[in-house]
């Protein structure tokens, strides 16, 4: 069984629990009473034409094991903010990534940055949950949602609840599905969800498929300033970086240098 299949099997069990009537009602009420979100989308298109860096809080991964199991999400988020991060990404999946909803909430409270909830959303109750816990944006992984109607419905519900949505694709067919569902932000992930192998050429090859009005985010395999510059040259507005930052002794310096990268001229003028 591929890693994604294992993760989704666990998510389906989690969704069943969230659908218990009292739990579902509490989640929906929290979503409707949540404070106004911070503007995640605007943060990803910098007015100075430079690359936006989404800095990730990530304890572990299925492929790499423990990365920073004892990290303090609030302290790390504050370091990211001081280093010039445009936004945060916080893993909230527990079984596979060691994350928690409390990680997102602590990071969000410690900074003024908009925060993306990084998890595997496959059901509308998780959309309400995402809004209710205070996230400003959520992730939709095209590979995890094979039904186009469901993908569109989840995206529409999130937007109705004022959540920004990063729709993640891994190949040309998934990019087409992401655009078709109305995505305003598309992340191109250079890591295979089946093998977890990484190749920045994947992102380079798919960037040109995205319409000019779509905010483009390069995900995975960006570990150096050269990697970030490569993605900016390919036409990405932003990069999402996790492993390189949580492993770094001085994430602020690396983040500042990535944030100085200039986005391709064609994107700055679009």
Image (cartoon, rainbow, N blue to C red):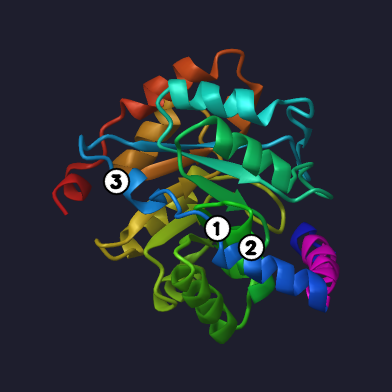
Structural distance between the alpha carbons of marks 3 and 2:
30 Å
In percent of width and height, residue 191 lies at 60, 49
Residue at left offset 78%, top offset 57%: 3
Q: Magenta includes 134?
A: no
Q: Nearer the viewer, residue 114 or 70?
A: 114
In percent of width and height, residue 135 lies at 56, 52
Q: Magenta includes 12?
A: yes
Q: Mark 3–mark 1 contact, CB under 8 Å?
A: no
Q: Mark 1–mark 2 contact, CB under 8 Å?
A: yes
Q: Is residue 77 left or right of residue 212?
A: right
Q: Which residue bears the numbered disc 2?
A: 30
Please give the range of residues in magenta. 6-20
Q: Which marked residue is nearer to the observer: mark 3 or mark 2?
A: 2
Q: Which marked residue is nearer to the observer: mark 3 or mark 1?
A: 1
Quadrant location of the C terminus? bottom left
Is residue 144 something one can see in this rendering?
no
Density class for disc 3 (Cα within 10 Å; few <14, some 14-19, many ≥20) is many
Residue at left offset 64%, top offset 36%: 106
Instruction: Tell me which label, 3 or 1, sits earlier in the chain.
Output: 1
Q: Mark 3–mark 2 contact, CB under 8 Å?
A: no
Structural distance between the alpha carbons of marks 3 and 1:
25 Å
Q: Compared with residue 181, is residue 118 higher up or lower down, i.e. above or below?
A: above
Q: Residue furthest bottom?
A: 149
Q: Compared with residue 191, is residue 132 higher up or lower down, i.e. above or below?
A: below
Q: Is residue 22 left or right of residue 194?
A: right
Quadrant location of the N terminus? bottom right
């Amino acid at each position: 069984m591929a890693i994604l299949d294992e993760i989704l099997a666990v998510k389906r069990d989690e969704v069943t629990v969230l659908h218990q009537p009292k739990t579902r009602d509490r989640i929906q009420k929290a979503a409707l009473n949540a404070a106004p979100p911070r503007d995640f989308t605007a943060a990803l298109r910098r007015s100075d034409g430079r690359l936006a860096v989404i800095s990730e809080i990530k304890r572990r991964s299925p492929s790499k094991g423990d990365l920073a199991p004892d990290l303090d999400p609030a302290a790390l988020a504050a370091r990211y903010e001081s280093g010039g991060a445009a936004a945060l990404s916080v893993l909230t999946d527990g079984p596979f990534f060691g994350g928690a909803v409390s990680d997102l909430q602590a990071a969000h409270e410690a900074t003024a940055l908009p925060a993306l909830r990084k998890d595997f959303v496959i059901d509308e109750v998780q959309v309400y949950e995402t809004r209710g816990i205070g996230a400003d944006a959520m992730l939709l992984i095209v590979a995890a949602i094979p039904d186009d109607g469901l993908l569109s419905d989840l995206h529409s519900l999130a937007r109705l609840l004022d959540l920004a949505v990063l729709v993640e694709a891994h190949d040309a067919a998934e990019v087409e599905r992401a655009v078709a569902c109305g995505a305003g932000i598309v992340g191109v992930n250079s890591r295979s969800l089946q093998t977890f192998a990484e190749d920045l050429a994947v992102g380079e090859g798919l960037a040109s498929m995205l319409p000019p009005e779509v905010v483009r985010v390069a995900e995975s395999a960006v570990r150096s300033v050269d990697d970030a510059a490569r993605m900016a040259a390919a036409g990405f507005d932003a990069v999402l970086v996790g492993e390189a930052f949580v492993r770094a002794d001085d994430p602020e310096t690396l983040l500042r240098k990535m944030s100085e990268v200039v986005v391709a001229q064609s994107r700055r003028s679009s």
